[in-house]
Image (cartoon, rainbow, N blue to C red):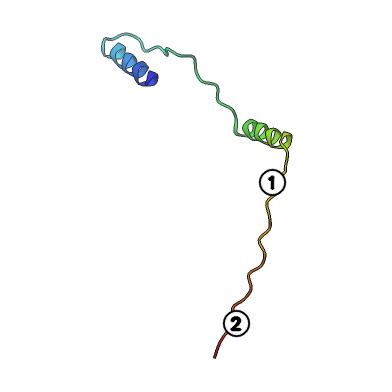
Amino acid sequence: MQLAQELKTLIEAKLAGQPAEALAPPRTILSLLDALKQSVQGRNGKDASNPVKEKAPRKRARRTA
């Protein structure tokens, strides 16, 4: 909701001939590699008590004549 209000204020300023200024500081964007590193660090800190179970192989159906 706040973003919509900021956009409306910016548009009104542009229509009035005033220079467009960003009201909020630019958002910090994490690089993909940094985000991955943080994710991996978070995973390593947790207990791995629920390991993924391997599925048992399915039995093949017998052919009937």
Q: Which residue is mark 1?
A: 50
Tell me the number on the disc at residue 62: 2
Residue placed at 72% from the left, 42% from the top? 48
Q: Nearer the viewer, residue 22 or 19?
A: 22
Place residue 17 in its image quadrant.
Answer: top left
Viewer-proximal residue, 6 or 50?
Answer: 50
2 over 50 or under it: above or below: above
Say which of 42 and 59 sits in front: 59
In the drawing, does residue 37 fall left or right of residue 6?
right
SS at mark 2 in the image:
loop
Q: Dot 2 surroundings within 10 Å: few (below 14), some, or many (20 or more)?
A: few
Q: In the structure shown, which secondary structural element does the residue marked by tag 1 occupy?
A: loop
Most extreme residue toward the left is 16
Q: Is residue 3 left or right of residue 43?
A: left
Cα separation between marks 1 and 2: 35 Å
Numbered circle sitting on residue 19: none
- Identify which residue is drawn at 71% across, 33% down: 41
In percent of the image, x 68 and y 58: which residue is there?
54
Mark 1 burial class by Cα count in 10 Å: few <14, some 14-19, many 20+: few
Q: Amino acid at mark 2?
A: Arg
> What residue is shown at x 55% (from left), y 21% (from top)?
28
